[in-house]
Image (tube, helix red, strand yellow):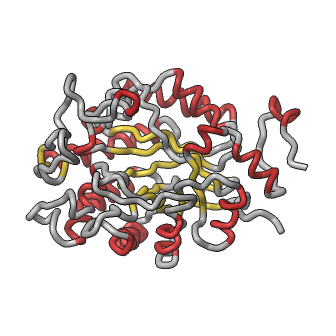
Amino acid sequence: MSSLLFEPITLANMQLPNRIVVAPMCQYSAENGTMNDWHIANAGSFARSGAGLVILEASGVEAAGRITHGCAGLYSDENEAAMARVVALCKSVGHSKMGVQLAHAGRKASTQRPWEGGVALTQDAWQTYAPSAIAFDNGWHTPEALDAAGMARIKGAFVAAAERALRIDMDVIELHAAHGYLLHQFLSPLSNQRDDSYGGSIDNRMRFPLEIFDAVRAVWPEDRPLFVRVSASDWVDGGWDVEQTTQFAEELQARGCSALHVSSGGNSPLQKIAIGPGYQVGFASFIRQRVSMPVIAVGMITDPFQAETIIRSGQADMVALAREFLRDPHWTWRAAKALRATSSVPPQYQRAVSFD
């Protein structure tokens, strides 16, 4: 029986050679949002891996939208030139399609790198923004509630970043509406307590994220996929949940979303997550049964047979791996051998790789 994990899939008019995605992973190693040699080495190792798609890390659409001082951005000419270098290198060493995750951290911006503590900055901090003036947690910055001008600025920043991504020949854009960052903050009643047309009902809470999607869709070519990453649950009673996520997915589908990347959590320090192998796959499966666009499962997917089962059982159309690719950048080759499939291998590596 041939592997479904290694079957091609077409998104928009773009064919991916298999259903394996390298999920975006922050490296916290940029300078003023500008990628450097670390990013070339890191992304290059994934690009030659044979994965169908490599999504570069969350990249702030404005400087204030970065999580940390070390986060990548796509808001300046310097950012654009450096990311262009990364993309060109990746395309020269492998056959993976390249994507970037466009993001705004909202109230979770202006923090330390994880290895420096990961809490709110006390020096060189910057103003944070959110739908409501509610801090993420005790000791975190209280954000400024966005007004109409601020929302227009951020919408324009997403559009400008998308235009930069197109100029550097990015294949895929993923909009980050997960993990407690700005677009997720608008969706969740835990972080959005506005009393205007952008708060209250689910239709109102979805309004700004959908406006961002529509604005990016208008400048991003129809033959290039546009994804959205979501948190399917806040893992907190009274918060954002999978039923609301499904409604959001239906709206995105109607607007031309190419795929939904289903994660969870990140919007509340009170979250109680039942972590284990494939712990988020059930969310992807729930949504996939209710929409027709492709759905990507992610979260502690580590084993080739586990990934194959997710696809074969119809729980998702693609699988995304993150930390497993940090541990083994050539996971795709290992999976192909285990599943008796084949994968692209650079000629320089063929003497070390056999799928027999």
Residue at the bottom extreme? 290
Residue furthest to the right: 356
In the rendered image, the quadrant that contains the N terminus is: bottom right
Q: Residue at x 72, y 64 (%)?
A: 4
Residue at image position (65%, 44%) is 96
**Image: 239 above or below 335:** below
Residue 228, given in percent of the width and then of the height, sits at: 42, 57
**Residue 213 location in percent, x, y?**
34, 57
Give the answer, above or below, for where 264 lies relative to 26. below
Q: Quadrant of residue 251?
A: bottom left
Residue sitting at x 65%, y 57%: 19
Q: State left or right for residue 176 relative to residue 110.
A: right
- Residue sitting nearer the eye, 240 or 50: 240
The location of residue 346, given as percent across then percent down, is 77, 35
Give residue 152's position: percent from left, percent from top.
19, 48
In this image, 161 relative to 139: left or right? right
Q: Nearer the viewer, residue 205 or 116?
A: 116
Q: Nearer the viewer, residue 93 or 262?
A: 262
Residue 14 visible: yes
Give me the residue at 69% from left, 32% from top.
93
